[in-house]
Image (cartoon, helix red, strand yellow):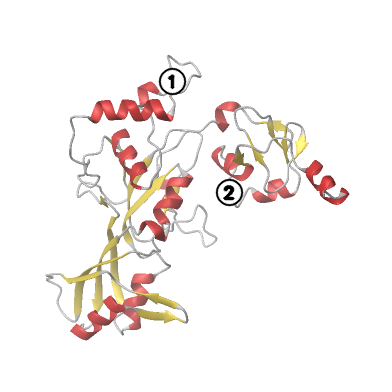
Amino acid sequence: MTTPEQTEKRTEKPTTQPGEKLQKILARAGFGSRRSVEPLIEEGSVKVNGRVAKLGDRADAMNDRIQVKDQLIKESRLEKQPTQVILYNKPEGRVCSREDDKGRETIYTQLPRIFNGRWISIGRLDLNTSGLLILTNNGELANRMMHPSYELEREYTVRVFGEVKPETIKLMLKGVELEPGLVAKFTNIHKMQSQDEGQNNWFRVTLKQGRYREVRRLWESQGHPVSRLHRVRYGSFTIPKSLRKGKTEELTWKQVNQLLKSVDMPEEARPDLRHNQGSSVRTTVKQASAINKQLNRKQKTIHDLSDGTFKKRR
């Protein structure tokens, strides 16, 4: 039996519940990250169809009237944008946050501008680590690529101090408890040929987690401080040799679709078929899949995402 209290709670809910969470919609419209827009909702600055929204509410971006501080958000800002993915060669000395309270340079000042969206970093590299960073405007894609269930490998070249014994390598492959309940390990360790003099040694290592400073902490736990760390691969992506530090390269439409499929997400339509002569008619996912199959029916091998053949360079 429904109590009056339960009925009252139901009537307080917004009338439009299907759709996306408001945080996701506002983030896509450029009001900040999903977490940073929560205070806007909590303070009552967001309305859906004239009604003050609450945290956890959902809305239909294309059919509902969404206002922020009584200003109506244009439909063009709310519509979903095609997935974009770029590779970025991060130099040392730049942080991966959008703002830095110490005034240090951030990676975002070197990225290309993006229409109706924001770049999301798939994983991070610390201040003194260089190499491959992947960024996208698709939050769901970023979340899936970082999720441990997909077990995407990260590969690094690392310079450590001191002669590394075989038993140390075996231990780091088996697993090291960095703190209570946190065991980390490499999936592969390969010693590289190096012309470095002294007691420095270079290794190529891979692991399937992306915890904070995990590579450095693993080596340091064995008494081998890291003096250089460079990421060369993330999943199927290898940093192109031609990609200079501080520069980006954009993936093609086919490469983006291959990436979406690799994390169980639907393909997107070919760019010139997403709009019909400038009208608002959008190609459906089913149509996109059919078009993609037709274009690729003669191609039997999977497209190699690491072949370095990218169309655009910034």
Q: Residue at x 19, y 81 (%)?
A: 199
Q: Quadrant of residue 308?
A: top left
Q: Amino acid at mark 2?
A: Arg
First reached walking from the N terminus: tag 1 or tag 2: 2
Decide if residue 280 is on the left or right side of residue 125: right
* Residue 292 image offset from top left, x and y in percent: 30, 29
Are there few (<14), some (14-19), or many (20+) residues within 10 Å of tag 2?
some
Give the SS element for disc 1.
Answer: loop
- Residue 314 in view (yes/no): no
Q: Quadrant of residue 82?
A: top left
* Residue 17 image offset from top left, x and y in percent: 67, 38
* Residue 179 image offset from top left, x and y in percent: 45, 81
- Residue 54 in view (yes/no): yes
Q: Nearer the viewer, residue 6 or 183?
A: 6
The residue to which callout 2 is attached is: 34
Q: Nearer the viewer, residue 113 or 102?
A: 113
Q: Residue at x 36, y 65 (%)?
A: 128
Q: In the displayed orientation, state which residue is furthest to the right.
A: 4
> Marks 1 and 2, Cα distance to the nearest angstrom?
28 Å
Q: Amino acid at mark 1?
A: His
Q: Residue at x 44, y 54 (%)?
A: 106
The residue to which callout 1 is attached is: 275
Decide if residue 64 is on the left or right side of residue 268: right
* Residue 15 image offset from top left, x and y in percent: 73, 35
Asked if 293 appears above or below 112 in the picture, the reply is above
Q: Residue at x 69, y 35 (%)?
A: 16
Give the SS element for disc 2.
Answer: loop
In the picture, the quarter occupied by the C terminus is top left
Asked if 167 appears above or below 99 in the picture, the reply is below
Q: Nearer the viewer, mark 1 or mark 2?
A: 1
Q: Quadrant of residue 258?
A: top left
